[in-house]
Image (cartoon, rainbow, N blue to C red):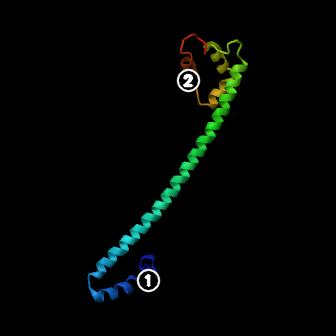
Amino acid sequence: TLSVSGGIQWEDVVLPLETLSMWFRPFFVLFIIGVNFGVLNILAAVFVSFVNRFVSEHCEQRLHDNFLGDSSTLDELRQMLVGNNQRDDLKITQKRLEKLLKGVGQEHLVKLDLDMDAAVGIFKILDSEETGAA
C-alpha cells in the first residue's frame, strides 16, 4: 500500500519479488494501476455525490422560496379580486376580471409571470358552465 500512496519506491518493492519470479513485475504494475484507478474512482464518486446532493438541496430550497412568493402574490390577488367584487354571489365576470387585471392586478400578473391571455384562459376553465361568471 505504500507503493500506491507514494511512500516507497516501486523498485524497492519489485526487486525482491523479481528474485522469486520475473512474472511478479507485470502483476505488481497491474495491481498498482488497478488500485490507483480504484481510489481515483472512489474519490470522484464521493465528489460527484456531494455536488449532486448540494445542487439538489439548493434547487429544492429555491423552488420552496418561489412557491412561498407565488402563494403570497396569489393571496394578494385573491383579496384584491374579492375586495373589488360587486356581486352578491362572489362570482366575477370576464369583463370585470380583465378590467381589474389591466389596472390594479397588473403587477400581480407580472410577479406570477402570467399575461392576460393566460388569466382569461384560467377564467374560462373555471367558467365550465359558460355563464360568463366564475
- Marks counted in the figure total 2
Residue type indicated by callout 2: Ala
Indicate the secondary structure of the residue bearing disc 2: helix
Identify the residue at the far left of this view.
22
| Position of residue 39 in the picture relative to residue 67 (left or right) | left
Rounded to the nearest angstrom, the CA distance separating label 1 from label 2 is 70 Å
Give the residue at the far front of this rendering: 89
Badge 2 density bin: few <14, some 14–19, many ≥20, Cα 10 Å: few
Where does the image place residue 66, in percent across and percent down from the top left?
Answer: 61, 38
Q: Quadrant of the N terminus?
A: bottom left
Q: Which residue is mark 1?
A: 8
Asked if residue 25 is positioned above or below residue 49 in the image, the reply reads: below
Q: Residue at x 26, y 81 (%)?
A: 23
Q: Position of residue 57 (x, y in %)?
A: 57, 49
Other-residue count near label 1 (Cα within 10 Å), few / some / many at <14 / 14–19 / ≥20: few
Disc 1 marks a residue whose amino acid type is Ile
Determine whether the residue tagged by mark 1 lies in a helix, strand or loop: loop
**Contact check, label 1 and label 2, Cβ < 8 Å:** no
- Horizontal arrangement in the rendering, residue 15 relative to residue 85 (left or right): left
Choose between 111 and 63: the one closer to the eye: 63
Task: Tell me which label, 1 or 2, sits earlier in the chain.
Answer: 1
State the image quarter where residue 27 is shown.
bottom left
**Which residue of the protein is positioned furthest toward the top in this rendering?**
131
Provide residue 109's location: percent of width, then percent of height.
Answer: 63, 27
Vertical comparison of 118 with 24: above or below: above
Residue depicted at x 67% and y 13% = 89
- When the figure is inspected, residue 38 is found, relative to residue 122, above or below; the finding is below
Which residue was labeled with disc 2? 118
Quarter where residue 70 is shown = top right
Name the image quarter holding residue 2: bottom left
Task: Name the residue rendered at 53%, 53% in the picture.
Answer: 53
